[in-house]
Image (cartoon, grey):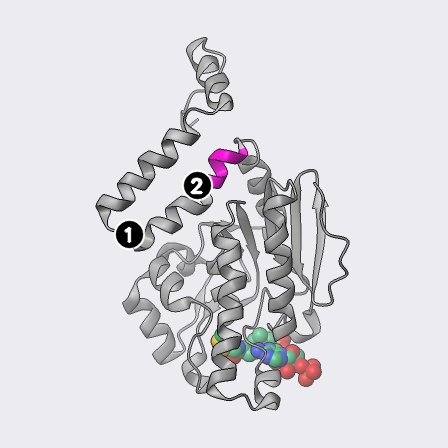
Amino acid sequence: MQLPPVKFRNIKVESEDNIAIVSLNRPAKRNALNAETIEELISIFSVLPRSGAKAAVLRAEGDHFSAGLDLIEHHQQGRTAGEFMQICLRWHEAFNKMEYSGVPVIAALKGATVGGGLELASAAHIRVADKTTYFALPEGQRGLFTGGGATIRVSELIGRTRMIDMMLTGRIYQAEEAMSIGLCQYLVEDDSDSRALEIANATAEAPSLSNFAICSTISHTRNMSALDASYMEAFVAGVVNTQADASDRLAAFADKTAARVRPD
Ligand code: 1HE
């Protein structure tokens, strides 16, 4: 895997085998997302699909995944509506790069995963929380509105009514309840980093082309009619299901050397 030799200020990028580990790295500011962090996320998630990375873990330094929009920067900059719309478009660029890139992104969550931090987490393909994780959308209480895609992704995860409740009341979902409503898919007793890495490694065992399809096609079909989406599904399956790797794997199933799908 060839990661860019760029030195980032707000994120840290490492690799373990073919897994990229991207860490939010402003723990003193609870990993609040300033404009520069968003630009750095755009940079790394732009190159990741061409780096040879088989999967990525998105994690954070410190006790909190992310406290969302950098409220101090936002306050100090006195942005106009037009300027803040441009900021939001950069957030969308970063999060779309994650969601549509075709490389599985596994988020390792802990502590505050709130506001824009939840928007970032919801752009990952899989979310792993630990017992300290909590989720909230405190935008309403701050006199703000979501701007990083929550209206689409968070409402998809938990439904519009729960999202509206979170925003109107400042309701906080702690790990277990969050898990039960779909804010995360895994809840671990110890640390979410190691489970996220395990999951990333497991996803990396599938052919990259299959993962590319899983981590882009399903999202792309979101806005299509059922007719168009099923056409696209057939088209992608035509490419993926005839790849050489699929033939080897099917041969292994036929000669009974491949693992069976059993719950034990
Ligand atoms: C920050 C931010 C931030 C902390 N922007 N600087 N998000 C929120 O409404 C959540 C705001 N943050 C908090 O509620 C708390 O900071 C936490 C519960 C996450 C953590 O509490 P704690 O006691 O550990 O830390 P702290 O003392 O509140 O903050 C430590 C430092 O981090 C402090 O800086 P310092 O220089 O005074 O030490 C804080 O200012 C800084 N900090 N959170 C900037 N968010 C695209 S639209 C998206 C809209 C939203 O995301 S709204 C949700 C905003």
Q: Residue at x 41, y 24 (%)?
A: 261
Percent of width and height locating residue 122: 46, 59
Q: Residue at x 60, y 68 (%)?
A: 38
User: Which of the 4 quarters of the picture holds residue 43?
Assistant: bottom right
Q: Which mark is residue 214?
A: 2
Is residue 160 a member of the stretch shown in magenta?
Answer: no
What type is the residue that disc 2 sits on?
Ile
Q: Which mark is residue 236?
A: none
**What main secondary structure does the magenta stretch of the protein show?**
helix
What type is the residue that disc 1 sits on?
Met
Q: Which is nearer the eye, 10 or 130? A: 10
The residue tagged 1 is 224
Is residue 210 a member of the stretch shown in magenta?
Answer: yes
Percent of width and height locating residue 90: 53, 69
Q: Earlier in the sequence, mark 1 or mark 2?
A: 2
Q: Residue at x 42, y 24 (%)?
A: 242
Asked whether disc 1 touches disc 2, contact meaning CB atoms under 8 Å apart, the reply is no
Q: Residue at x 22, y 44 (%)?
A: 227
User: As displayed, is residue 66 above or below residue 51?
Assistant: below
Closer to viewer: mark 1 or mark 2? 1
Spatial CA distance of label 1 from label 2 is: 16 Å
Q: Using the rendered image of the protein, determine whether residue 27 is visible from the camera's viewpoint.
A: yes
Q: Look at the image and give the residue range highlighted in magenta.
A: 208-212
Which quadrant does the C terminus fall into? Answer: top left
Q: Residues within 10 Å of mark 1 (few under 14, many from 20)?
A: few
